[in-house]
Amino acid sequence: MKLLFRKSRAGFTLVELLVVIIIVSLLSALTLGALRSGGIRAKEDSARSFVIHISESLLELFEELDDQGSTTEVINGEYKIRWQIPVSRSDAMMLSGGVPIFPFGSIYGAYALNITVGSSNESAECLYMIVTQTGYFGDFLEMLHETQVADTDGNGMNEFIDPWGTAIRLEFSPPSPPNAFDIQNLPIIHSAGVDQEFGTGDDIMSIDLVNGIFLQ
Protein backbone atom coordinates (compact mmCIF):
# COMPACT_ATOMS: atom_id res chain seq x y z
CA MET A 1 0.00 0.00 0.00
CA LYS A 2 1.42 3.28 -1.05
CA LEU A 3 1.23 6.20 1.32
CA LEU A 4 0.75 9.55 -0.33
CA PHE A 5 2.22 12.57 1.43
CA ARG A 6 0.94 16.06 0.59
CA LYS A 7 3.61 18.68 0.71
CA SER A 8 2.78 21.09 3.51
CA ARG A 9 2.53 24.80 2.83
CA ALA A 10 5.65 26.52 4.13
CA GLY A 11 4.17 30.00 4.83
CA PHE A 12 2.33 33.01 3.48
CA THR A 13 2.67 34.27 -0.02
CA LEU A 14 4.04 37.74 -0.68
CA VAL A 15 0.59 38.99 -1.64
CA GLU A 16 -0.90 37.71 1.61
CA LEU A 17 1.84 39.40 3.61
CA LEU A 18 1.26 42.68 1.80
CA VAL A 19 -2.47 42.47 2.51
CA VAL A 20 -1.79 41.87 6.21
CA ILE A 21 0.67 44.78 6.36
CA ILE A 22 -1.82 47.10 4.68
CA ILE A 23 -4.61 46.08 7.06
CA VAL A 24 -2.39 46.52 10.13
CA SER A 25 -1.22 49.92 8.85
CA LEU A 26 -4.79 51.09 8.31
CA LEU A 27 -5.87 49.94 11.75
CA SER A 28 -2.84 51.62 13.33
CA ALA A 29 -3.55 54.87 11.50
CA LEU A 30 -7.19 54.83 12.61
CA THR A 31 -6.23 54.06 16.20
CA LEU A 32 -3.57 56.77 16.32
CA GLY A 33 -5.96 59.25 14.72
CA ALA A 34 -8.61 58.49 17.31
CA LEU A 35 -6.09 58.79 20.14
CA ARG A 36 -4.77 62.08 18.77
CA SER A 37 -8.28 63.46 18.37
CA GLY A 38 -9.15 62.36 21.88
CA GLY A 39 -5.96 63.95 23.21
CA ILE A 40 -6.77 67.25 21.53
CA ARG A 41 -10.30 67.23 22.93
CA ALA A 42 -8.97 66.49 26.39
CA LYS A 43 -6.56 69.43 26.19
CA GLU A 44 -9.30 71.70 24.86
CA ASP A 45 -11.55 70.71 27.75
CA SER A 46 -8.71 71.33 30.19
CA ALA A 47 -7.96 74.75 28.66
CA ARG A 48 -11.63 75.71 28.70
CA SER A 49 -11.95 74.70 32.35
CA PHE A 50 -8.85 76.72 33.31
CA VAL A 51 -10.01 79.77 31.36
CA ILE A 52 -13.40 79.61 33.09
CA HIS A 53 -11.75 79.20 36.49
CA ILE A 54 -9.55 82.26 36.00
CA SER A 55 -12.43 84.28 34.55
CA GLU A 56 -14.84 83.52 37.38
CA SER A 57 -12.23 84.44 39.98
CA LEU A 58 -11.32 87.66 38.19
CA LEU A 59 -14.95 88.68 37.73
CA GLU A 60 -15.48 88.33 41.47
CA LEU A 61 -12.77 90.95 41.97
CA PHE A 62 -14.31 93.06 39.20
CA GLU A 63 -17.70 93.00 40.91
CA GLU A 64 -16.18 93.83 44.30
CA LEU A 65 -14.34 96.81 42.84
CA ASP A 66 -17.59 97.82 41.15
CA ASP A 67 -19.37 97.71 44.53
CA GLN A 68 -16.65 100.00 45.90
CA GLY A 69 -17.50 102.59 43.27
CA SER A 70 -14.56 101.98 40.95
CA THR A 71 -16.85 102.12 37.90
CA THR A 72 -17.98 105.65 38.77
CA GLU A 73 -14.62 107.24 39.54
CA VAL A 74 -12.84 108.35 36.37
CA ILE A 75 -9.06 108.64 36.15
CA ASN A 76 -7.37 109.80 32.95
CA GLY A 77 -10.61 109.30 31.05
CA GLU A 78 -11.09 105.71 32.20
CA TYR A 79 -13.00 104.23 35.10
CA LYS A 80 -10.79 103.49 38.08
CA ILE A 81 -11.64 99.79 37.84
CA ARG A 82 -9.76 99.72 34.54
CA TRP A 83 -6.48 100.42 36.31
CA GLN A 84 -7.11 97.79 39.01
CA ILE A 85 -7.25 95.06 36.36
CA PRO A 86 -4.34 96.18 34.16
CA VAL A 87 -3.43 94.60 30.85
CA SER A 88 -0.13 96.44 30.43
CA ARG A 89 2.76 97.68 32.51
CA SER A 90 1.72 101.31 31.99
CA ASP A 91 -1.81 100.47 33.21
CA ALA A 92 -0.40 98.83 36.32
CA MET A 93 1.76 101.85 37.13
CA MET A 94 -0.90 104.48 36.47
CA LEU A 95 -0.88 107.36 38.96
CA SER A 96 -3.66 109.59 40.22
CA GLY A 97 -2.57 112.91 41.68
CA GLY A 98 1.01 111.66 41.63
CA VAL A 99 0.33 108.59 43.77
CA PRO A 100 -0.46 104.95 42.85
CA ILE A 101 -4.15 104.29 42.38
CA PHE A 102 -5.77 102.68 45.42
CA PRO A 103 -6.05 99.83 46.41
CA PHE A 104 -3.44 97.91 44.39
CA GLY A 105 -1.37 100.63 42.79
CA SER A 106 1.61 100.38 45.13
CA ILE A 107 1.69 96.58 44.83
CA TYR A 108 1.41 96.71 41.06
CA GLY A 109 4.02 99.42 40.68
CA ALA A 110 6.74 97.44 42.43
CA TYR A 111 5.92 94.19 40.64
CA ALA A 112 5.26 95.65 37.20
CA LEU A 113 8.73 97.20 36.95
CA ASN A 114 9.98 93.86 35.65
CA ILE A 115 7.26 93.39 33.02
CA THR A 116 8.60 94.00 29.52
CA VAL A 117 6.71 96.75 27.70
CA GLY A 118 5.41 95.61 24.33
CA SER A 119 6.04 91.94 25.01
CA SER A 120 3.52 89.48 23.57
CA ASN A 121 3.15 88.24 27.14
CA GLU A 122 2.67 91.66 28.73
CA SER A 123 -1.02 91.17 29.52
CA ALA A 124 -0.39 87.54 30.58
CA GLU A 125 2.19 88.74 33.10
CA CYS A 126 -0.27 91.38 34.31
CA LEU A 127 -2.88 88.67 34.81
CA TYR A 128 -0.46 86.59 36.87
CA MET A 129 0.39 89.70 38.89
CA ILE A 130 -3.26 90.45 39.64
CA VAL A 131 -3.99 86.92 40.80
CA THR A 132 -0.86 86.43 42.90
CA GLN A 133 -0.25 89.89 44.37
CA THR A 134 -3.60 91.36 45.40
CA GLY A 135 -4.52 88.80 48.06
CA TYR A 136 -7.98 88.21 46.57
CA PHE A 137 -7.36 84.82 45.01
CA GLY A 138 -6.36 82.50 47.86
CA ASP A 139 -8.82 79.74 46.92
CA PHE A 140 -7.79 79.90 43.27
CA LEU A 141 -4.10 79.67 44.10
CA GLU A 142 -4.65 76.67 46.37
CA MET A 143 -6.08 74.73 43.42
CA LEU A 144 -3.39 75.88 40.98
CA HIS A 145 -1.09 73.17 39.62
CA GLU A 146 2.58 73.80 38.89
CA THR A 147 2.06 72.75 35.26
CA GLN A 148 -0.30 75.72 34.81
CA VAL A 149 2.44 78.30 35.44
CA ALA A 150 5.62 79.05 33.50
CA ASP A 151 7.95 81.81 32.39
CA THR A 152 7.48 81.23 28.67
CA ASP A 153 9.65 84.10 27.47
CA GLY A 154 12.45 83.76 30.03
CA ASN A 155 12.22 87.31 31.39
CA GLY A 156 11.79 86.20 34.99
CA MET A 157 8.04 86.89 35.08
CA ASN A 158 5.55 84.03 35.26
CA GLU A 159 2.37 83.56 33.28
CA PHE A 160 -0.52 81.15 33.43
CA ILE A 161 -0.26 78.71 30.55
CA ASP A 162 -2.73 76.52 28.68
CA PRO A 163 -2.16 72.77 28.04
CA TRP A 164 -0.12 73.60 24.92
CA GLY A 165 2.31 75.76 26.90
CA THR A 166 1.10 79.12 25.56
CA ALA A 167 0.70 82.06 27.93
CA ILE A 168 -2.94 82.92 28.70
CA ARG A 169 -3.73 86.57 28.03
CA LEU A 170 -5.92 89.13 29.75
CA GLU A 171 -7.92 91.50 27.56
CA PHE A 172 -10.88 93.83 27.90
CA SER A 173 -13.99 93.47 25.78
CA PRO A 174 -14.43 96.42 23.41
CA PRO A 175 -16.61 99.42 24.29
CA SER A 176 -18.75 98.57 21.25
CA PRO A 177 -19.38 94.81 20.96
CA PRO A 178 -20.09 93.24 17.53
CA ASN A 179 -23.76 92.90 18.43
CA ALA A 180 -26.08 94.84 20.68
CA PHE A 181 -25.29 92.71 23.71
CA ASP A 182 -24.14 94.53 26.82
CA ILE A 183 -20.80 92.74 27.15
CA GLN A 184 -18.35 95.59 27.11
CA ASN A 185 -15.40 96.78 29.16
CA LEU A 186 -15.20 93.43 30.94
CA PRO A 187 -12.03 91.35 31.47
CA ILE A 188 -11.59 88.48 29.00
CA ILE A 189 -9.34 85.45 29.55
CA HIS A 190 -7.89 84.25 26.25
CA SER A 191 -6.13 80.98 25.31
CA ALA A 192 -4.64 80.63 21.82
CA GLY A 193 -5.89 77.05 21.52
CA VAL A 194 -4.31 74.05 19.86
CA ASP A 195 -2.53 75.98 17.08
CA GLN A 196 -0.89 78.27 19.68
CA GLU A 197 -1.73 81.35 17.62
CA PHE A 198 -4.06 84.09 18.81
CA GLY A 199 -6.80 85.33 16.54
CA THR A 200 -7.60 82.02 14.84
CA GLY A 201 -10.73 79.87 14.90
CA ASP A 202 -9.67 77.54 17.71
CA ASP A 203 -9.08 80.26 20.32
CA ILE A 204 -10.73 79.73 23.70
CA MET A 205 -12.11 82.90 25.29
CA SER A 206 -14.09 83.41 28.48
CA ILE A 207 -16.64 85.66 26.76
CA ASP A 208 -18.37 85.03 23.44
CA LEU A 209 -18.82 88.57 22.17
CA VAL A 210 -20.79 87.56 19.09
CA ASN A 211 -23.50 85.72 21.00
CA GLY A 212 -23.21 87.74 24.17
CA ILE A 213 -22.57 84.88 26.58
CA PHE A 214 -19.95 83.85 29.11
CA LEU A 215 -18.13 80.55 28.67
CA GLN A 216 -19.49 77.89 31.00
Image (cartoon, helix red, strand yellow):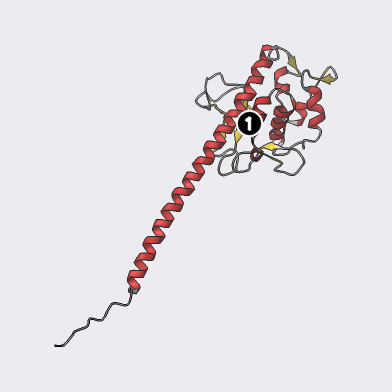
Residue 37 x %, y %: 47, 46
Residue with the most extreme left position? 1
Left or right, 191 with respect to 129, comes to left
Q: What residue type is labelled 1?
A: Met
Closer-to-camera residue (99/150): 150
Picture residue at 46% right of the left edge, 53% below the top: 32
Picture residue at 82% right of the left edge, 29% below the top: 110
Kind of element beneath mark 1: helix
Residue pointed to by mark 1: 143
Numbered circles on residues, count: 1
Q: Residues within 10 Å of mark 1 (few under 14, many from 20)?
A: few
Picture residue at 60% right of the left edge, 24% below the top: 56
Left or right, 24 with respect to 118, comes to left
Left or right, 214 with respect to 185, comes to left
Q: Is residue 201 visible?
A: no
Closer-to-camera residue (10/20): 10
Residue 9 x %, y %: 29, 77
Closer-to-camera residue (123/77): 123
Residue 42 x %, y %: 51, 40
